[in-house]
Amino acid sequence: MDSGSNFTALTTLWIKECTRFLRIWIQTLVPPAITMTLYFVIFGSLIGERIGQMGGFTYMEFIVPGLIMMAIITNSYANVSSSFFSAKFQRNVEELLVSPVPTWAIILGFVGGGVARASLIGIIVTAVSLFFVDVNIHSVAIIVVTLLLTSILFATAGLINGIFAKTFDDISVVPTFVLTPLTYLGGVFYSLTLLPEFWQWVSKANPIVYMVNGFRYGFLGVSDVNVFVSLGLLVVFNLVLFSLAYVLLQRGTGIRS
Amino acid sequence: MHALNISGLKKVYKGGVEALKGVDLQVEQGDFFALLGPNGAGKSTTIGIISSLVNATQGKVNVFDFDLDSQKAAAKACIGLVPQEFNFNQFETLQQIVINQAGYYGVPRSEAKQRAEKYLKQLELWDKRNARARELSGGMKRRLMIARALMHEPKMLILDEPTAGVDIEIRRAMWTFLREINEQGITIILTTHYLEEAEMLCRHIAIIDKGRIVENTSMKSLLAKLNVETFVLDVKCSGEPVLEGFTTRMTDANTLEVDVPKTTGLNPVFSQLDQQGVQVMSMRNKSNRLEELFVRLVESGREEGAE
């Protein structure tokens, strides 16, 4: 197909993916808004007031960027892993396999759906946070770039999970046993400087630390790690996962016999 | 130029099951072609490879001279697939399903909407355009898959048992529709278990068994090979009639099966039965002609293979 046709195929898949998560908005958009409201009430207002300052900001101001990032990570991953696996399960992924849609467009279509959902949830959670705190913005560019790179990364990771998954259990294993612990230990609720030096080093092996801190830098202008290292790592991780997803789909792993 | 040209196609699945053992097949442009075979013969694997759902182990597939390996996109654009199992998103509406499918082939949305109206109307689904696919009856779901396969206006339509499980009225309406689009120039390849369907619709036929093509010819010449036909007669008689020149079997006290050579005809059967005082109450073919031939070809292929 020519580039115009490829673009039509890509936008078709992207619109289809957006329509999917908007159609089931009660499952996809409402839960993160409720969860984050509870975090803001409990950790921000009730407990946060007793904690006092962190990194030079109130505890509420400190955790808002991390909580937004947590919602972005969880939802971009879940959107694509669930959508791709459902397409495999219902066999409608065959609609794509029989058609001349290039592999890169299939990846971008699914990932684009995950990014759209994550961005929308980022906006919703930010709007909710405004009821509790005045949100500072240090650099819009850093916020947008970190949001996009992180949601692309976890949407691609969700796609790879969906490619390998054989049962619905397989798409909940990684979020439960890998993603959630890494996110909670990724500096969402605390500054790494509170940890003993050894655990600071251990924490720096957690990639989510770089995303949370990069995002927090965009809002507050403070970070436990160098923000350019964060962005650099995000670019590298994205290239690695995109290449992996491309190879897997080209080979037909999990979708062709 | 052939619509489809397959040479030396082999498929070995993980675990060592050899589904195709070197299939060679050509389908002419504009043909209505039947691919028949018993369950597990390799029909769906062959179709799966042609439509890029299954990776071939070895062999070449050309679709309208486009190599499926090196010119994949062009080859795929020529094919419309109606698979055996329902494989659309059950939660999407009919319009969404067909419009999206056109989009995957690069058809712009405005054009896709016009085509959706055209094909959903042709397949009598337009009234249901905003219904979710899961709300449709089995026959409607089959027609939806045909409409979806036509959305990018392919040159060749492959239907894998399209009338399985649909009632006779819908089946006949689908036959009429398929004949019409074939007359418009679309090459059709059909697999079916209803051999009557293949006999009525198709001009050429290939029979596949155990991963090999055991017959590939025109329907006329295949049926010409049928030199014996079996008739079942409901009779009233006191003992087993003896028919000189015919092989007979009494399957119960009132049912006589007679193998009638094509060159002989039925007159000698009736005259001999009349002479023996046997009353013939009714008569029918044991199975349709193609079915009989199909069983013989598959059985003879297996006997040869066993040697």
Image (cartoon, coloured by chain):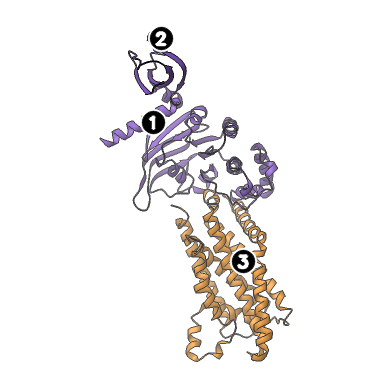
Q: Amino acid at mark 1?
A: Val
Between the C-alphas of marks 2 and 3, the distance is: 84 Å
- The chain coloured orange in the image: A
Q: Nearer the viewer, residue B196 or A57?
A: B196
In the rendered structure, find residue B274 and report the number of the disc placed on it.
2
| Residue at image point 46% right, 29% down | B204
Q: Determine if marks 3 and 1 fall on one subunit.
A: no
Q: Chain of mark 3?
A: A
- The chain coloured purple in the image: B
Q: Amino acid at mark 2?
A: Asp
Q: Which residue is mark 1?
A: B295
Q: Whole-percent x and y of residue B243?
A: 34, 14
Numbered disc in front, either 2 or 1: 2
| Residue at image point 61% right, 72% down | A72
Between the C-alphas of marks 3 and 1, the distance is: 56 Å
Whether pointer 2 and pointer 1 mark residues with C-beta atoms closer than 8 Å, the reply is no
Say if A30 sits above or below B259 in the image.
Answer: below
Element marked by disc 1: helix
Q: Nearer the viewer, residue B139 or B59?
A: B139
Between the C-alphas of marks 2 and 1, the distance is: 32 Å
Q: Whole-percent x and y of residue A226?
A: 56, 83
In the rendered structure, find residue A115 and report the number of the disc placed on it.
3
Whether pointer 3 and pointer 1 mark residues with C-beta atoms closer than 8 Å, the reply is no
Element marked by disc 3: helix
| Residue at image point 25% right, 35% down | B307
Q: Chain of mark 2?
A: B
Say if B247 sits above or below A251 in the image.
Answer: above
Q: Whole-percent x and y of residue B35?
A: 45, 35
Say which quarter of the image contains residue A44: bottom right
